[in-house]
């Protein structure tokens, strides 16, 4: 037995080594070929172009960006942040809708079940591209024109050009307001953790829901009022009519809104199915046992069924999150300046540095995906718990 | 909707081609075209008067006619062309990768494009960037667009001109860019933007595409110089000369009074020396380009002179009604000037 195994193992090693050599040779040949071709066409390879002036404007930027001074690297960051913004918000929103729908599909209420099933079957069977166009073209067209925007009250306006909201001026003392909200969120997380400890230790848990809401929602206005009393009132930029459009305040552009809603609504249908599958994977007896222990339906779901279902839910959920990030590149179709739109569109065209731009874009999506997968795998390890 | 992933695809194609293709181009473009039996021409595919398929699916336009003229000079057959529509984002990579032989896609000749990616042998059309606005706004000058929202197609010089123009005048604007012109025009028409900006020559056609063309006007002002030139790959002088002289032949023919209608008759009469040289009755000029002596005669016979092509595709007799303007012959106050064929 031992004599016959050794040559086999040696052969396996040799084959693998050969494969590695072949791959390395291919990569080298491809790189050398590309370098030679680029040199022949007079294209200067490398990432030096990133420092050159961009000269074009971008409709939405989370960091300061002006055509006069910005470089291609700035344009890259603007595009990347826009991608991250819409992806992160879409992941949150899709998870919320998806879990609600998935749980509704297993609810005792017939109406809830039917509605959730109809949603899933309709939405997941229509291409995302089409849905984005419906949101961007059809829904936007139904909104009032820029000449007579709808006043939603509290200084908010809605028109074809977007949703315009009052924006607190966060310079000077103003940054304390978002700071307070951040502290509120952190404090709530600590409360949740304390509550779990208390439950696990068999002590009487403190209430979390009401204090949490107060901390998260109330901290901002509270600090705002405090600052006003202290003589540093937070200025609010109110949206107002300009010659063409509403100006000032916080503008939520229709391109962003359409992409966010489209991505969330579409991905929620898949997440709902994943959640339903997860719930179905938990043995019936678990629910019955929870009921026998006098847990309410909500408690049974939250404390008994969902924790077990998560083991089935999290891995495919991770794939959905990765899909959302990658699908956000469909932004090019509706004019949302995401990374692909700005970098692979305008910058690639202005600079002709195709290899570098494509490589960098691919690397970015790969990094985002790997980071998401890493975080989700960590979470998965937690929900799976110790092996049993 | 057409070619939604054009930038992505084009770039991917280039990447794959540069990485994977073995030594593809050892010989010149002309030799390849002759061996292949047809010319491959990159066009826009959506600009009325320059390149657009008509109701029967036949390509029409000034850029299309330029490619037909090139094919006529090479093969004595203007139909030996394959037209491949290119998005503005994918066009340069298509040329660099060898997918097309010549890019006749109302492309603006700029220094950075000239040095980075390709050569521009000759200016075939002089244009400038303009604005399409709703008539109801009552606007007459671009300056009145201060603080307005402008829709445009991304990845073109349009974006840069707009930023420069507004900035130097201390005016502001908001921009929404789209991957192709249909989306940009659609967004403008549906009310997303106050103005739609692109080259003036395209605006004439874009205006006709709107549901009610009479509700929209093209502002007189142009905010940039947009010299349109066909593009060829760097490092192929013979092909570059051929592309340049195809245009010059059409200009010189117009100046000499040789038209598609009278070229056959003129050839029999064979009067003035410059007409004789253009038609190849005197000298062996076409051979220097790698063609036959009657190369220019073929162009005019099959496609016509520059004026013929302009009138057929853009002029007063077409729905576009674009004035000759800068594109008149130099003898008539325009900029079109052909070096002598001799």
Image (cartoon, rainbow, N blue to C red):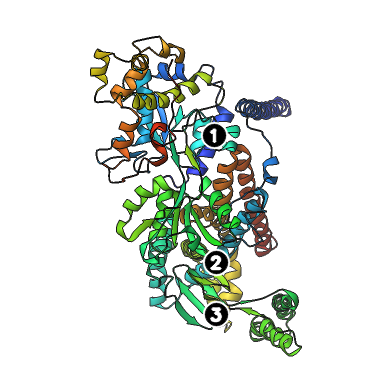
Looking at the rendered image, the disc whose residue lies closer to the viewer, 1 or 3, is 1
Within 10 Å of disc 2 (Cα), the crowding (few <14, some 14-19, many 20+) is: many
The answer to whether any part of residue B100 appears in the image is: no
Residue farthest to the bottom, as pictured: A229
User: Mark 2, chain letter?
Assistant: A
Residue farthest to the top, as pictured: B283
Residue annotated with mark 2: A95
Residue annotated with mark 1: B14
Q: Are marks 2 and 3 in contact (CB under 8 Å)?
A: no
Q: Which is nearer the eye, A34 or B247?
A: B247
Where is residue B139 shown, x and y percent of the image? 42, 63
Looking at the rendered image, the disc whose residue lies closer to the viewer, 2 or 3, is 2
Residue at disc 2, secondary structure = helix
Residue annotated with mark 3: A298
Within 10 Å of disc 1 (Cα), the crowding (few <14, some 14-19, many 20+) is: many
Within 10 Å of disc 3 (Cα), the crowding (few <14, some 14-19, many 20+) is: few
Q: In the drawing, does residue A131 fall left or right of residue A52?
A: left
């Amino acid at each position: 037995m031992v004599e016959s195994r050794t040559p086999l193992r040696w052969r396996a090693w040799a084959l693998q080594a050969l494969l590695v050599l072949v791959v390395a040779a291919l990569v080298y040949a491809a790189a050398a070929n590309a370098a030679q071709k680029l040199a022949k066409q007079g294209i200067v390879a490398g990432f030096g172009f990133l420092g050159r002036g961009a000269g074009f404007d971008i409709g939405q930027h989370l960091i300061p960006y002006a055509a006069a001074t910005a470089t291609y690297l700035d344009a890259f960051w603007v595009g990347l942040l826009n991608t991250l913004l819409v992806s992160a918000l879409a992941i949150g929103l899709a998870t919320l809708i998806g879990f609600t729908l998935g749980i509704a599909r297993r609810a005792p209420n017939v109406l809830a079940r039917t509605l959730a099933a109809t949603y899933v079957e309709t939405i997941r069977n229509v291409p995302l591209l089409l849905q984005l166009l419906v949101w961007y073209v059809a829904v936007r067209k139904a909104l009032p024109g820029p000449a007579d925007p709808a006043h939603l009250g509290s200084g908010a306006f809605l028109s074809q050009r977007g949703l315009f909201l009052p924006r607190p001026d966060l310079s000077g003392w103003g940054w304390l307001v978002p700071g307070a909200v951040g502290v509120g969120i952190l404090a709530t997380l600590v409360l949740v953790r304390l509550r779990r400890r208390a439950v696990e230790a068999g002590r009487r848990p403190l209430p979390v829901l009401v204090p949490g809401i107060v901390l998260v929602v109330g901290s901002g206005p509270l600090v705002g009022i405090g600052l006003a009393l202290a003589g540093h009132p937070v200025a609010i930029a109110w949206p107002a009519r300009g010659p063409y459009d509403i100006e000032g305040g916080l503008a939520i552009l229709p391109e962003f809104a359409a992409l966010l809603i489209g991505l969330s609504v579409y991905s929620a249908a898949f997440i709902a199915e994943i959640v339903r599958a997860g719930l179905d994977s938990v043995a019936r007896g678990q629910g019955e046992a929870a009921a026998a222990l006098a847990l309410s339906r909500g408690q049974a779901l939250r404390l008994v069924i969902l924790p077990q279902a998560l083991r089935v839910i999290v891995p495919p959920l991770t794939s959905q999150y990765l899909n959302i990030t990658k699908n956000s590149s469909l932004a090019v179709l509706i004019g949302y300046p995401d990374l692909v739109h700005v970098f692979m569109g305008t910058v690639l065209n202005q600079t002709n540095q195709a290899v570098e731009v494509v490589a960098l874009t691919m690397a970015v999506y790969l990094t985002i995906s790997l980071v998401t997968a890493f975080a989700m795998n960590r979470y998965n390890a937690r929900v799976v718990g110790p092996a049993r | 909707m057409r070619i939604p992933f054009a930038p992505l695809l084009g770039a991917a194609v280039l990447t794959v081609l540069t990485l994977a293709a073995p030594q593809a181009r050892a010989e010149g473009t002309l030799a390849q075209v002759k061996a292949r039996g047809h010319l491959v021409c990159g066009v826009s595919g959506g600009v009325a008067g320059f390149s657009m398929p008509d109701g029967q699916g036949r390509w029409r336009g000034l850029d299309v006619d330029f490619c037909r003229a090139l094919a006529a000079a090479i093969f004595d057959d203007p139909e030996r062309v394959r037209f491949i529509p290119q998005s503005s984002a994918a066009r340069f990579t298509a040329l660099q990768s060898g997918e097309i032989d010549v890019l006749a896609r109302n492309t603006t000749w700029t220094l950075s494009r000239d040095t980075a990616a390709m050569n521009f042998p000759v200016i075939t059309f002089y244009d400038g960037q303009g604005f399409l606005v709703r008539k109801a706004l009552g606007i007459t000058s671009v300056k009145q667009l201060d603080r307005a929202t402008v829709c445009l197609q991304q990845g073109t010089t349009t974006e840069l001109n707009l930023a420069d123009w507004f900035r130097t005048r201390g005016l502001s604007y908001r921009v929404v860019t789209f991957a192709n012109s249909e989306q940009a025009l659609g967004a403008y028409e549906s009310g997303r933007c106050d103005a739609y900006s692109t080259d003036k020559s395209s605006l004439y056609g874009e205006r006709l595409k709107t549901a009610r063309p009479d509700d929209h006007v093209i502002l007189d002002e142009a905010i940039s110089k947009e010299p349109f030139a066909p593009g060829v790959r760097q490092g192929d002088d013979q092909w570059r000369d051929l592309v340049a002289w195809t245009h010059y032949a059409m200009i010189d023919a117009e100046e000499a009074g040789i038209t598609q209608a009278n070229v056959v008759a003129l050839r029999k009469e064979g009067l003035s020396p410059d007409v004789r040289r253009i038609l190849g009755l005197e000298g062996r000029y076409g051979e220097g380009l790698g063609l036959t002596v009657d190369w220019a005669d073929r162009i005019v016979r099959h496609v016509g002179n520059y004026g013929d092509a302009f009138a057929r595709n853009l002029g007063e007799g077409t729905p576009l009604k674009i004035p000759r303007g800068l594109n008149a012959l130099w003898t008539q106050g325009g900029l079109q000037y052909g070096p002598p064929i001799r």
